[in-house]
Image: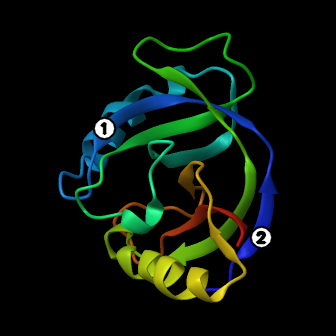
Amino acid sequence: MIPKINILPEKKLVGKRITMTLLQNKTFELWQSFMPFRNQITNAVGSDKFSMQVYAPDFDFNQFTPQTIFEKWAAIEVSDFLAIPENMEPYVLKGGLYAVFNYKGKPENGSEAFHYIFKEWLPNSIYEVDKREHFEILGDKYIRDNEDSEEEIWVPIKLK
């Protein structure tokens, strides 16, 4: 997996969030609460879904463990915040420099991809993790529970 290095402009997102850890993974619960109501977002930009992780501003990513608490979002991009459905929230994705990895396979097997990114690619690159949002884009090729599913993994980076 060789990443593309992209500069992402700021994006406006609308969605739902939940606080969780990897040990108490509530991703399914979050998406189950978001997907039936996503069509209520009338000012969507495209059909991509964002699965986003937001960590505390002072969090040292080298200290990440399965017990690390973070905020998980299920969201889509919008043109503005003028029409936010009830029970959803706005979020401004800061943008910036990202390493973008294409992942193909079942989401539950994604830990191998993340291991490669954080334990092999990143330490051997000229980059380190930046303190911004991490996210996956679930586009048209994303198929839940399918070996042929594809998604993009976006990791915030900066020069070492």
Q: Residue 108 lies in what quarter of the image?
A: bottom left
Residue at 39% x, 60% y is 144
For residue 45, what is the image quadrant?
A: top right
Point out the image quarter for the N terminus: bottom right
Camera-nearest residue between 92 and 147: 92
Name above or below for residue 39 compared with residue 112.
above
Q: Is residue 128 above or below residue 52?
A: below
> Residue 147 versus residue 23: which sits nearer the camera?
23
Q: Return the mark for residue 19.
A: 1
Q: Position of residue 96 (x, y in %)?
A: 76, 51
User: For the image shown, how many numbered marks are present on the structure?
Assistant: 2
Relative to 74, 123 lies left or right? right
Assess whether mark 2 and mark 1 are in contact (beta carbons under 8 angstroms). no
Question: Which residue lies under the disc numbered 2?
Answer: 5
Q: Residue most toward the left?
A: 24
Q: What amino acid type should be assigned to the residue bearing mark 1?
A: Thr
Residue 55 x/y as whole percent: 45, 46
Q: Residue at x 54, y 54 (%)?
A: 134
